[in-house]
Amino acid sequence: MKLTRRHTLMVAFGSVVAAMLPVRAFAALEDDIAAFTGGADVGSEGITLIAPEIAENGNTVPIEVNAPGAEAIIVFAAGNPTPAVATFNFGPLAAAQSAATRIRLAGTQDVIAIARMPDGTFVQASQEVKVTIGGCGG
Amino acid sequence: MAENVKPRVRVPGNATAGEEITIKTLISHTMESGQRKDGDGNAIPRSIINRFTCAFNGEIVIDVTLEPAISTNPYFEFQAIVPETGTFEFTWYDDDGDVYTDSKDITVG
């Protein structure tokens, strides 16, 4: 195949678009995290995220978050079209600041949980989940 | 998606004062994410439950904001303190404005 100038340009353009896509998704996640934390530093102690290492079906992946004393826990799926998954706000009658649910994952990616503590600090946990079948249709 | 929505809740029938109990809830709902396309390639509009709350005698236990990444038939498991005899009230808020409720009585003996 002869490599013409048109081909070269198309290949170059294609790779630029491909490089931009994950960056854009990542920026959405950063914006969402900033909206929750207000840009504060995020620690890593005092929060547990339980998720399977391998999920056969991305349509229903069981996860559990636990952050003793937290006011709220927010969960993100870094590789989903919309990264936000759920926000748990704990009231005065919550016996433990923990909750379990089932989420959708579009593919292999990191699941991130961030807890807001009553003193205004934030802690974060994340785990990679390998997904065999994606869960966002399409 | 207001038809065939059925909440299911599991709460123990009785407890001792101040006991920590585990509550499990499930509601049948398609949780259409808005990402899927139908056979003609048109996007299927989003239709999900966007909020779930659990309260005991009016005091909040947990208040959850749901996004489209929550699976079909949203399931939640969490812990609550039972200070006295009373009623757990569960509320789900649908995108289309519908509100589904369920309640369970618990006796402190």
Image (cartoon, coloured by chain):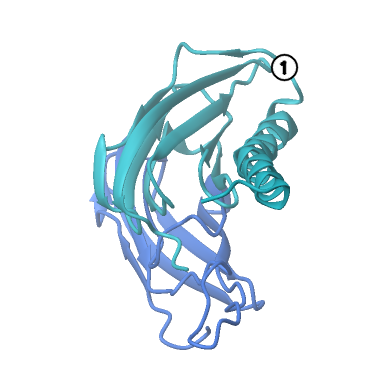
Residue B88 is situated, as x and y percent measured from the top left of the image, at 44, 57
Q: Which chain is cyan?
A: A
The correct choice, above or below, for B79 with respect to B54 in the image is: above
The correct choice, above or below, for B21 with respect to A1 in the image is: above
- The residue tagged 1 is A40
Q: Residues within 10 Å of mark 1 (few under 14, many from 20)?
A: few
Q: Nearer the viewer, residue A98 or B16?
A: A98
Q: Is residue A118 left or right of residue B73?
A: right
Taking the spot 46% from the left edge, 56% from the top edge, the residue there is B70
Q: Chain of mark 1?
A: A
Q: Nearer the viewer, residue A62 or A96?
A: A62
Residue B46 is situated, as x and y percent measured from the top left of the image, at 60, 72
Q: Is residue A1 left or right of residue A24?
A: left
Residue A131 is situated, as x and y percent measured from the top left of the image, at 31, 46
Q: Nearer the viewer, residue A45 or A71?
A: A45
The hue of chain B in the figure is blue
Taking the spot 49% from the left edge, 13% from the top edge, the residue there is A44
Evaluate whether residue A137 shows in this view.
Answer: yes
Please give the count of numbered marks on the rendered protein: 1
The correct choice, above or below, for A99 with respect to B34 in the image is: above
Taking the spot 35% from the left edge, 59% from the top edge, the residue there is A59
Q: Nearer the viewer, residue B92 or A65?
A: A65
The correct choice, above or below, for B34 with respect to B89 in the image is: below
Residue A34 is situated, as x and y percent measured from the top left of the image, at 72, 29
Residue B26, image quadrant = bottom left
Taking the spot 48% from the left edge, 87% from the top edge, the residue there is B39
